Amino acid sequence: MQVEEHKSLKDYNTFGIDCTARYFVAVTSVEELQQILSGQLTGGARKKLENRFILGGGSNMLLTKDIDALVIYLNLKGIKICSETDNQVTIQAMAGENWHEFVRYCLEKDYGGLENLSLIPGNVGTAPIQNIGAYGVELKDTFVSCNAIEIATGKEHTFTKEDCDFGYRNSIFKNEAKGKYIIVSVTFQLTKKDHDLNTGYGAIQQKLTEKGIETPTIKDISEAVIEIRQSKLPDPKKLGNSGSFFKNPVVDSQKFQEFKSKHPEAPYYQILENEYKIPAGWLIEQAGFKGRRFKDAGVHENQALVLVNHGTATGEEIWQLALKIQQAVKDQFNIYIEPEVNII
């Protein structure tokens, strides 16, 4: 367990922002994490422990400044089968496993349930925090529990699905438990046969039809999702980004009717009797930002939800662009779009 000083975080965040950590340590076991949290460090790193910063896959954050703290990088690896029956398997993945690689592992074993969540950037440990979702599926649909270390005591706790209080891109870890726990592993229940396929999302069905697939497998669905995502979303290794920067706003019936009367052409999804989701990407595109570039900070040409770093943009420059977009959407549609990305 080696503590480094003045460590560049450029390779540890998908925006490729070149910020620096005052101290940096990678942990490869729960025991190492507990040792650090108990203060088993020396010198300046121990002093900065109070301002610790937990780093996972770096896919859901925008660094706007250097981090004058101890950055703890969760490099916890491992996948194991907890239990299984003829049709179901309970599987646990450690927090440092790459999310898409974990999905691929499950697909190779013919475990169903995560195929619609293919190619989402980030690691397993951060997935429950925002209840990641895509193409009609959310993490909570297969989630059983997660183990997390309580920062104040170093003790390990188990959170059930009910404990996590999942919502749209939301969980207890973004609210009352924020900053109090570090997720170290996540457990899922997946199917081994008789998979419950979700092809209701229009683009998936269209892609399957194009391929002439009438009876899709979970791998077929995953490949369709990957092709759709790759056609819309840039590869962070080639163009810095964090996927969808904004959440799709959810409005009540009254606000929706006002919006729809002024913009009858707008797409929408009814999610509850009194709740409607309006695609933030459409709002941003109508506000004139799709494909625009402000120095090296920009909006992706194929998906207006994605803000990108064309090379040397600072986190602050990207954040200022996000604020400009927010204000333009508010002025034009009277709708507030909330960042999905954590601003550091």
Image (spheres, rainbow, N blue to C red):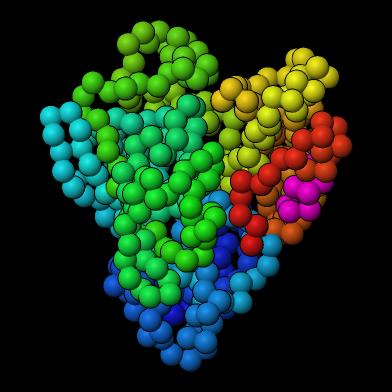
Where residue 99 appears, x then y in whole percent? 40, 45
The N terminus lies in quadrant: bottom left
Determine the residue located farthest toward the left in the rendered image. 86
Where residue 14 appears, x then y in whole percent? 56, 52
Where residue 311 appears, x then y in whole percent? 68, 52
Residue occupying image coordinates x 40% and y 54%: 125
The C terminus lies in quadrant: bottom right
Residue occupying image coordinates x 54% and y 38%: 168
Magenta stretch, overall SS: helix
- Relative side of 175 to 279, left or right: left
Residue occupying image coordinates x 19% and y 46%: 81
Residues rendered magenta in the picture = 318-325
Is residue 321 highlighted in magenta?
yes
The quadrant in which residue 191 appears is top left
Q: Is residue 145 visible?
A: yes
Which residue is more in the foreground, 23 or 89? 89
Which residue is more in the foreground, 182 or 261? 261
Q: Is residue 293 visible?
A: no
Count of labels in the image? 0
Is residue 322 highlighted in magenta?
yes
Where residue 204 appears, x then y in whole percent? 47, 19
Relative to 88, is 46 above or below? below
Which residue is more in the foreground, 47 or 271? 271
Relative to 193, is 309 above or below? below
Residue occupying image coordinates x 83% and y 19%: 262
- Relative side of 221 to 120, left or right: left
